[in-house]
Image (cartoon, rainbow, N blue to C red):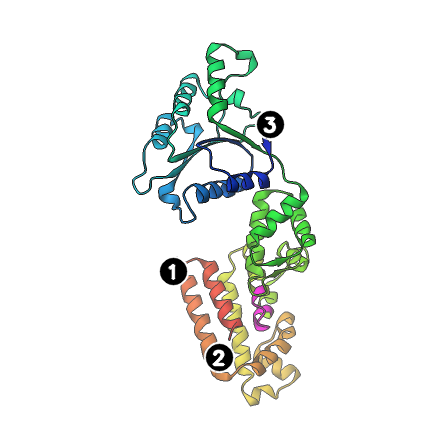
Amino acid sequence: MAKADNKYIITYRNFLGKLEKENIPDIILLSLKEKILLDDIVKAICGKFIGKDFDPVNNLISFNADDKQTENVLNECSNTGLFSDKKVVILKNVKKFSKDDKQSYTDYFKRPNPDTVFVMVSAAEEFSPGKVFSYDSKLENENSAEVKKIVESSVKIFEIGGFTEDELINWIKEKFGDYKISSDTIAGMVQYSNHSFDEIMSEIEKLKTYCFLSKEVTMEAVNLCNGIAKDFKETDFIRAVIERDNEKALMIYEKISLKKDVEVFLVFLLNAAFVIINKLYDPGVSKFQGWQLKRELKLWPDEQEQLLPYYRKFRNSLDYGKMKFIFENIYQSDKLLKSSGRDKRSIMTSLINNICGS
């Protein structure tokens, strides 16, 4: 992005600090590329100007400059809201205003509504107030000089500069909230996200889900969530559930489900696994060895036979009466997956949590 003017450039952190310490300007012209940062900035503006309990439905109105709704935008800025005295109006994708639009906006700038904060946002490659309001030197005339005077006296102009490495790491730490994560782990995560803010936010949400129980994000978790450590299979999922590793089971399910619709098949495999575990409660079956046991439990694939030690361990750790609870959960999950429009992920998450917590 070409720099508008050094006097307008400010870091993201310093800008938030300025919003916190000073009164919110009536009119702001803001230049930044990252939509995610805009969401944070708008939230900070609303919190300071309206209060922490602001309602986005009634207190925040958003327009897109590409839709050419100048009259609607200015009416919204000028009028008092139905449910609140104060509001924030956002106009996104601001570029060079037409002659009529420029006149309409500058007329409003002369007498802005003190109960409205009007934020114009530009993500254009060549952002500058002179280009937006058509008063750069090549077009200098009496009218443009007047517009320049009005803009510079009424509009607070900020261009959000890029993050330093430390600023990015601190911003990511804030997004993780009460999760424990080191700066080195964040640096590794950022490498996998190609320094894209959208990808970084997606990765943060994925890691928060995976590490929900431990509340600690490690480099191992980052590697696993990015599929670097292993390309998981359905039997890896069954083993994770049998070992009651809730986080790993959820992560493997998420990874497999990205490639195919696998929920019904996973529930089928879980049912087969617990049928085997259920049979191991029978003293007559549990005393079998080798071929006899393999035939009785139908452990034909080698991968199924390799799971046998984990089946035995689960049987020894669980009261037989709780098997009914597990089978009921498997049955209900299978029924919901086949007959309802409910979210598959929520069904599987509930099933995994119930089995691992049994």
Residue 144 covered by magenta stretch: no
Q: Pick whichever, 335 or 139, lies toward us.
A: 139
Q: Residues within 10 Å of mark 1 (few under 14, many from 20)?
A: few
Q: Which residue is mark 2?
A: 323
Q: Is residue 186 above or below residue 94?
A: below
Q: Position of residue 104 (x, y in %)?
A: 39, 21
Q: CA distance from mark 3 to mark 2?
A: 69 Å
Q: Quadrant of the N terminus?
A: top right
Nearer to us of marks 1 and 2 is: 2
Q: Of the two numbered discs 1 and 2 on the same chain, state the one appearing first in sequence.
A: 2
Q: Of the two numbered discs 3 and 2 on the same chain, state the one appearing first in sequence.
A: 3
Give the quadrant of residue 343.
bottom left
Q: Is residue 333 above or below residue 164?
A: below
Nearer to us of marks 3 and 1 is: 3
Q: Is residue 336 left or right of residue 353?
A: left
Q: Which residue is mark 3?
A: 7
Residue 254 appears in the rendering: no
Q: Residue furthest left?
A: 82
Q: Position of residue 310 (x, y in %)?
A: 62, 76
Q: Of the two numbered discs 3 and 1 on the same chain, state the one appearing first in sequence.
A: 3
Q: Which residues are magenta?
A: 240-247
Q: CA distance from mark 1 to mark 2?
A: 25 Å
Q: Which residue is mark 1?
A: 340
Q: CA distance from mark 3 to mark 1?
A: 58 Å
Q: Residues within 10 Å of mark 2 (few under 14, many from 20)?
A: some
Q: Amino acid under label 3? A: Lys
Q: Residue furthest front?
A: 22
